[in-house]
Amino acid sequence: MNNGPISRYPFARDIPAGDNRERHVCGDCGWIHYINPNIVVGAVCTWEDKILLCKRAIEPRHGYWTVPAGFMEEGESTVEGAARETLEEACARIEIDALIGIYNIPRISQVHMMYRARMTGPEMGAGEESLDVKLFAWEDIPWDEIAFPSGVWALKHYHETKDLTAFQPFDNPEIDRHRSRPVG
């Protein structure tokens, strides 16, 4: 039995054959570790004429308000992720109405996709990642206390497009049919 240190793969930054940029490449086996942008999904959610915001209980931006949003999980669509994040952060169920914005943030290697959504009922509450949740009239939104620029952009795009006919996002049933786990 070997009680020595666990061997580490000798990863180095290199340009793999057929590629055009440096990647993390294993010097022993040639395995390439791709580091790609993270996708954040969220929704500007409404109940009647008010907008749902969550006060963050976690860093970054602890104590600031945000639209419910977070990183996608493996095996879910962007629509499913936005609905899950809303349920986790605000204990609210939603119906997605339209995609209102895609925000590229290359400096932190993220892409944010924000949807317009309606709450299915007035029920809401602070989830594990929220200190508080509240419905705000447009004129009462605490703009100086919004956590992230993408939240401000999404709120403004919501306001600019709220009266337009919705573009209905959909999950391709042909793809969903081939999933290895149940949807939902």
Image (cartoon, helix red, strand yellow):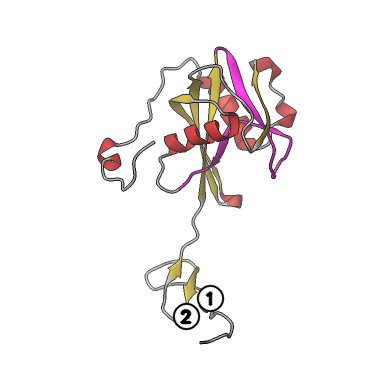
Looking at this rendering, what residue extends furthest in the top direction?
A: 48
Q: In the rendered structure, which amino acid carries the disc numbered 1?
A: Ala
Examine the structure image and report whether residue 126 is included in the region drawn in magenta.
no
List x then y, in percent, for residue 70.
56, 40
Task: Verify CB contact (< 8 Å) between mark 1 and mark 2.
Answer: yes
The answer for how far apart the CA atoms under marks 1 and 2 are is 7 Å
Secondary structure beneath label 2: loop
- Asked if residue 101 can be seen in this view, the reply is no
Structural crowding at the residue carrying mark 1, measured as other residues with C-alpha within 10 Å and reported as few (<14), some (14–19) or many (≥20): few
Structural crowding at the residue carrying mark 2, measured as other residues with C-alpha within 10 Å and reported as few (<14), some (14–19) or many (≥20): some
Q: In the rendered structure, which amino acid carries the disc numbered 2?
A: Gly
Q: Which mark identifies residue 27?
A: 2
List x then y, in percent, for residue 96.
44, 26
Q: Is residue 10 above or below residue 113?
A: below
Query: Residue at (51%, 20%) from the top-left corner?
Result: 119
Query: Residue at (47%, 73%) from the top-left corner?
Result: 25
List x then y, in percent, for residue 160.
54, 20
Q: In this view, does 58 lie above or below 7?
A: above
Q: In this view, does 58 lie above or below 146?
A: below
List x then y, in percent, for residue 57.
69, 38
Q: Please tell me which residue lies in front, 90 or 29.
A: 90
> Magenta segment, which residues?
48-73
Give the residue pinned by disc 1.
12
Q: In which quarter of the image is the C terminus?
A: top left
- Asked if residue 145 can be seen in this view, the reply is yes
Q: Please tell me which residue lies in front, 136 or 83.
A: 83
The tag earlier along the polypeptide, 1 or 2, is 1
Q: Quadrant of residue 31?
A: bottom left
Secondary structure beneath label 1: strand
